[in-house]
Amino acid sequence: MLQRDTTMHKGLSAKNASVSYGQTAVFQSLSFRVKPRTLTALIGSNGSGKSTILRMLAGLIKPRSGSILLDGCSIFDLSVKQMARRIGVLSQGPVAPEGLKVEDLVRQGRYPHRSLFGRWSVQDDKECNDALRLTGMDDFRDRQLDSLSGGQRQRAWISMALAQQTDILLLDEPTTYLDLAHQIEIMELAVDLVRQNGKTVVAVLHDLNQAARYADCVLLLKEGSIIAAGTPDAVITAENIANAFGVLAEVCRDPFTGTPMYIPLPRQKDRDRSEQ
């Protein structure tokens, strides 16, 4: 019987969670809530704990203390299949067997909904077709993954996660190593999944301007602590950027979206050189 914490709101949350690797503490007593049907961005310098938090939310790392809750229930009380029906995960740089076709990859997303010897059903077909349609990959279903561009491969992997029929998607650096056009493509897809399909998306991002433009909520991490959380306006400030990254910046308005846009200032030696 699952023990429900009735004091927590609906959604995915951490409550006083602490994680260590051996004797090294990654973070301690971390608490936050991911609001349903939003895109939440985790940002911070390398080693700040972003990917560790994502892995913890996915149930891949169990906190030394504290809880990770889904609708008030500990996710560690759920079976692997129960978790896979609620939370889809796209890790950084996923790898598929050579020669695997897009449709075969997407079909793997149906495993949480099938019994060991269950036959492939009309519903399975529908969910795979819907996932391919949502990501614009329907025309690529017969293509091998290794024949696709980087952005197309990312969309194929997201299709597999969507075929799981989860309400929550966790994306670990989904735009890393992609060119600019494909980065925009993936971020706009994530926004569409939230706005048009009611998904909850949590993404680890390195680009602060991507987080500012596309996210509803931003968590800014430094050395295992959340030093700012809220809307992009509240988090993407010159003071917070200097604190988290040690970089001076001007923050102005994106002329198209009105969201914050940061411009890093030259370091002192570069300013001195330009003034000579």
Image: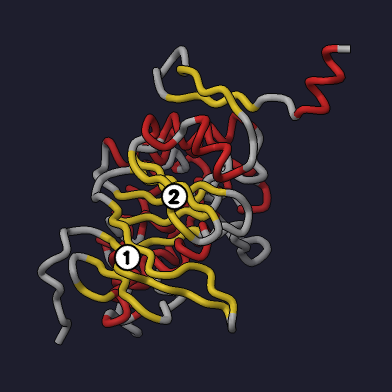
Q: Residue at x 49, y 58 (%)?
A: 90
Position of the C terminus by quadrant: top right
Q: Nearer the viewer, residue 141 or 205?
A: 205
**Which numbered disc covers residue 31?**
none
Answer left or right for 19 relative to 97.
left
Along the viewing direction, whichever of 95 and 201 lies nearer the viewer: 201
Q: Is residue 250 left or right of residue 37?
A: right
Quadrant of the image occupied by residue 191 = top left
Q: Is residue 23 visible?
A: yes
Please tell me which residue lies in front, 46 or 257: 46
Label 1, secondary structure: give it: strand
**Residue 104: horizontal and vertical position, in percent?**
50, 61
**Residue at which label 2 appears:** 227
Neighbour tally class for label 2: few under 14, some 14-19, many 20 plus, Cα within 10 Å: some
In the rendered image, residue 119, in percent from the top left (x then y), is placed at 32, 75
Mark carried by residue 14? 1
The x and y percentages for residue 33 are 28, 56
Amino acid type, mark 2: Ile
Residue sitting farthest toward the left: 6
Q: Amino acid at mark 1?
A: Ala
The image shows residue 227, relative to residue 57, as above or below, that is above
Q: Is residue 172 above or below residue 133?
A: below
> Sequence order check: which comes first, mark 1 or mark 2?
1
68 lies above or below 157: below
Can residue 118 be spotted in the picture?
no
- Give neighbour class at mark 1: few <14, some 14-19, many 20+ (Cα, 10 Å): many
Q: Residue at x 48, y 67 (%)?
A: 27
User: Is 3 left, or right, of 105 in this rendering?
Assistant: left
Residue at the location (24% across, 67% down)?
Answer: 70
